[in-house]
């Protein structure tokens, strides 16, 4: 499995220090939650901060855009050096076009689903996505509880991917700790995102190591 550490739960006053220990940890990706206060009821960080974060991160950048009209920012996200750009199904009127443009910009393309959105709506778009991000909380905030219905969504999505003979990755985001992480892996997830479980732990490096062993 792959682990993406979410910067949203970091100490924003000391981001450089936070990224330096993340670089030294066993985490696979650095997960960046970009919010606009419209698609989700919160704001996080924008390009001036992200440029500085990207400059010190040695981990691949996993950008999760919780914004309306994310297609407007594809080139800015690419210029940060992002490996994977994930947009929300619910925020894209022309999802096929947006995913295609993300790939044309040289990034992997991800599509994310809110908790209420069934995975079956991906039936015709799955070949255009390198990854599907299942939100296991309502997006906008770290530290929420895992919605257990997400496990059934992961199983149904895994079956759809296998039926189509694709290699699309399944990433799960929200309320992931050692227990829910184990459940999501068993259900078929490939990538876990974790924020609070890592940053609120007295020993974040060891939590990352334990998650990597799931
Ligand atoms: C929530 C974000 C998550 C968040 C997860 O909208 O997409 O990436 O950082 O935080 P935890 O792991 O604390 O639920
Ligand atoms: Zn996220």
Image (spheres, grey):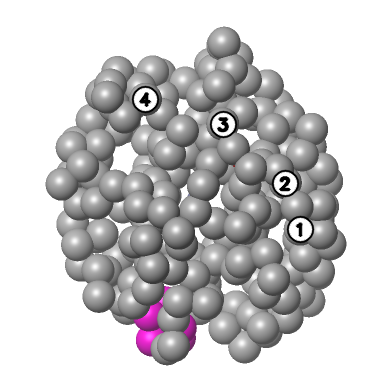
Residue carrying label 4: 11
Magenta span: 95-99
Q: Residues within 10 Å of mark 3 (few under 14, many from 20)?
A: many
Residue 31: in sight, yes or no?
yes
Determine the secondary structure under disc 2: loop
Residue carrying label 2: 146
How far separated are the C-alphas under marks 4 and 1?
A: 29 Å
Q: x and y percent of residue 102 in the render?
A: 34, 72
Q: Within 8 Å of ligand 1, the CB of disc 2?
A: yes
Residue carrying label 3: 196
User: For residue 52, what is the image quadrant?
Assistant: top left
Q: x and y percent of residue 76 in the render?
A: 19, 62
Q: Are marks 1 and 2 in contact (CB under 8 Å)?
A: yes
How far separated are the C-alphas under marks 3 and 2?
A: 12 Å
Residue carrying label 1: 150
What residue is rendered at 18% in x and 57% in y? 79
């Amino acid at each position: 499995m792959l682990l993406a550490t979410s910067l949203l739960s970091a100490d924003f006053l000391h981001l450089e220090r936070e990224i330096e220990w993340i670089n030294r940890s066993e985490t696979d990706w650095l997960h960046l939650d970009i919010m606009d206060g419209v698609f989700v009821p919160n704001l996080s960080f924008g390009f001036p901060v992200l440029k500085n974060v990207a400059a010190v991160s040695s981990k691949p950048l996993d950008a999760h855009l919780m914004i309306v009209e994310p297609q407007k920012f594809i080139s800015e996200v690419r210029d940060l050096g992002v490996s994977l750009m994930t947009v929300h199904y619910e925020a894209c009127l022309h999802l096929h076009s947006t995913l295609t443009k993300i790939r044309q910009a040289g990034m992997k393309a991800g599509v994310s689903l809110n908790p209420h959105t069934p995975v079956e709506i991906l039936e015709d778009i799955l070949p255009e996505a390198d990854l599907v991000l299942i939100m296991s909380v309502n997006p906008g905030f770290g530290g929420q509880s895992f919605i257990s219905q997400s496990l059934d969504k992961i199983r149904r999505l895994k079956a759809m991917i296998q039926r189509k003979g694709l290699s699309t990755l399944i990433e799960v985001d929200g309320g992931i700790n050692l227990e829910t992480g184990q459940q999501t892996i068993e259900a078929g997830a490939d990538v876990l995102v974790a924020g609070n479980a890592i940053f609120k732990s007295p020993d974040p490096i060891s939590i990352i190591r334990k998650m990597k062993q799931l």
